[in-house]
């Protein structure tokens, strides 16, 4: 604040000020007193806000890696976690199907010889129930993890029907998982080779 020669505060400079008699107007202050000049009170315009930047969305991509000769693919759930199509049930099914069927066949023949023909049906029925249970377990595990799951009813077209349907459905959801079907196919091929070798070995005697 400035002061005059006499020490009293100097009046404000001439300019437009809010009208003491009407807050909606401005009145011209002449430097020494109010004048009769008035105008509507002006309000400084508010600068418009810049539009918010669009939120970038990132599509979930499957991430693949190779381990033990079989491709293992993980599926992102979008919550900082990773869902894998590898389930305990599907690997038990792929690795144990051939030994289970061979054992069931041998037990069935043994029971038919030593007990009765009716008793020989028990091993195949138990094997069917175990395989069906593993298929349902795998199906429910995939659904619980949020992954596309083939219907367990494909099992009625043999275990190969379910494995092929599972592979196709997962691939349709962007998840490539060929390990279980490749393992089962390799074990069956090995069984065929061993059977042929055994047949030729017995025929050569």
Image (tube, rainbow, N blue to C red):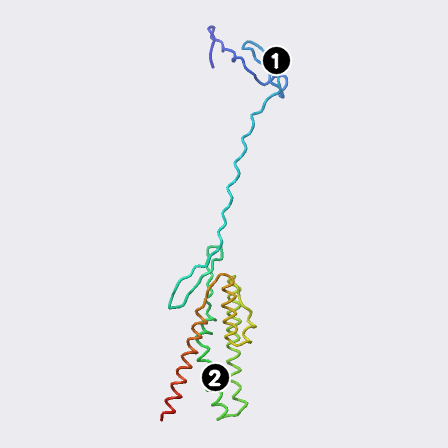
Please tell me in which quadrant of the rendered image residue 70 appears.
Answer: bottom left
Disc 2: which residue: 104
The image shows residue 164, relative to residue 198, as above or below, that is: above
Mark 2 or mark 1: whose residue is earlier in sequence: 1
- The residue most toward the top is 6
Residue 161 position in % (x across, y down): 52, 74
The numbered mark at residue 81 is none
Identify the residue shown where x is 38% and y is 66%. Answer: 67
The quadrant of the rendering that contains the C terminus is: bottom left
Identify the residue shown where x is 42% and y is 75%. Answer: 186
Front residue of 205 and 68: 205
Front residue of 136 and 169: 169
Q: How many marks?
A: 2
Residue 49 position in % (x across, y down): 53, 35
Q: Are marks 2 and 1 in contact (CB under 8 Å)?
A: no
Disc 1: which residue: 37
């Amino acid at each position: 604040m400035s002061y005059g020669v006499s020490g009293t505060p100097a009046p404000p400079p001439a300019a437009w000020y809010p009208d003491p008699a009407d807050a909606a107007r401005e009145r011209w202050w002449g430097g020494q007193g109010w004048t009769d000049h008035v105008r509507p009170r002006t309000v400084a315009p508010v600068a418009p806000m810049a539009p918010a930047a669009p939120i970038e969305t990132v599509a979930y991509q499957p991430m693949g890696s190779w381990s033990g000769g079989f491709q293992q693919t993980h599926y992102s759930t979008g919550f900082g976690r990773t869902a894998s199509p590898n389930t305990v049930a599907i690997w038990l099914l792929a690795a144990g199907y051939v030994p289970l069927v061979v054992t069931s066949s041998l037990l069935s023949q043994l029971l038919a010889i030593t007990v009765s023909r009716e008793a020989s049906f028990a091993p195949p029925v138990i094997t069917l129930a175990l395989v069906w249970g593993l298929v349902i377990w795998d199906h429910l595990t995939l659904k619980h993890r949020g992954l596309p799951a083939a219907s367990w009813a494909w099992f009625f077209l043999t275990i190969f029907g379910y494995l092929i349907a599972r592979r196709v459905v997962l691939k349709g959801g962007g998840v490539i998982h060929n390990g279980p079907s490749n393992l089962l196919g390799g074990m069956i091929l090995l069984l065929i080779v061993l059977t042929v070798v055994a047949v030729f070995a017995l025929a050569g005697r």
